[in-house]
Image: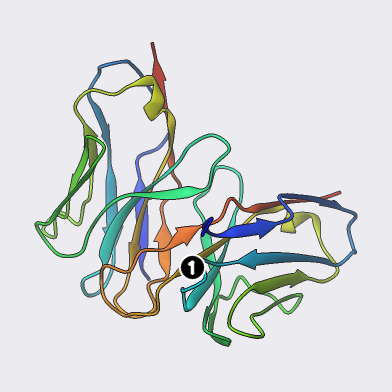
Amino acid sequence: GNSVTQMEGPVTLSEEAFLTINCTYTATGYPSLFWYVQYPGEGLQLLLKATKADDKGSNKGFEATYRKETTSFHLEKGSVQVSDSAVYFCALSYYGNNRLAFGKGNQVVVIP
Amino acid sequence: DTGVSQDPRHKITKRGQNVTFRCDPISEHNRLYWYRQTLGQGPEFLTYFQNEAQLEKSRLLSDRFSAERPKGSFSTLEIQRTEQGDSAMYLCASSEGGTGRNTEAFFGQGTRLTVV
């Protein structure tokens, strides 16, 4: 079936450090790929998306590139801030009903 | 429009009781989705509606679960004879009805259910 795998465990890093969260997917066909973010006490928010191979999604300094050859959609940010502390979910959906399949999420903690 | 709203935000119930949650989607959105999220996991799809029609149900949605969207606007999710394993965050999302790849789902803040 269609699934998303995120790297294990929380991520703790210092302010201004480089952030990478790995995401790989298993799917038939050509899904759309997403990163959602959940800040403390808030609902899931779409951070960025890419709908076809080699597309790069970007928002708020975060970037992710849809890599069909490696079935990956890794999230990166060059210089994190304390306000980036949140849980990040990678997800995919299919053309049609747009329902989402999520990874387990990664807690990111940025220390001043 | 204030986005997707869910009620209640928190619910504590005794095992065996019935509970009902409500979701009010963004008003112009045709599609409405329910997801369940347990601790340390990502949300898992339960069911979705296109207007008032329930078009897909996950195998996670046992016979004790029922969802409705009677007029194509708000939706309710009912769990009968709750079990401790039903304890989770129940998330509602809505999106426009198009089939295009750029259709974005907007999530509510969820209803946290605790079965004791």
The kind of residue tagged 1 is: Ser
Q: Dot 1, how many residues are within 10 Å of its Cα: few (below 14), some (14-19), or many (20+)?
A: many
Left or right relative to A68: residue A109: right
Element type at mark 1: strand
Outermost residue, top side: A112
Q: Chain of mark 1?
A: B
Looking at the picture, does residue A23 appear above or below residue B100? above
Height in image: B87 above or below B104? Answer: above
Task: Name the residue at 40% across, 74% down.
Answer: B96
Give the residue at x 55% y 67%: B25
- The structure residue drawn at horizontal position 25% and vertical position 17%, both measured from the top left corner, is A16
Residue A82: x percent and y percent? 39, 20
Which quarter of the figure has residue B16? bottom right
Query: How was this image coloured?
Result: rainbow
Measured from the top left, where is residue B51 in percent x and y? Answer: 52, 84
Q: Residue furthest front?
A: B1
Q: Specify whether residue A10 is in view.
A: no
Above or below, A38 against A79 in this view is below
* In this picture, residue A76 sits left or right of residue B99: left
Left or right relative to B63: residue B47: left
Q: How many numbered badges does the structure rendering display? A: 1
Provide residue A66's location: percent of width, then percent of height: 16, 55
Can you tell which quarter of the image residue B2 is in? bottom right
Q: Position of residue B109 (x, y in %)?
A: 58, 50
Residue A106 in view here = yes
Write down the residue under mark 1: B94
Please give left or right for residue A13 compared with residue A87 in the image.
Answer: left
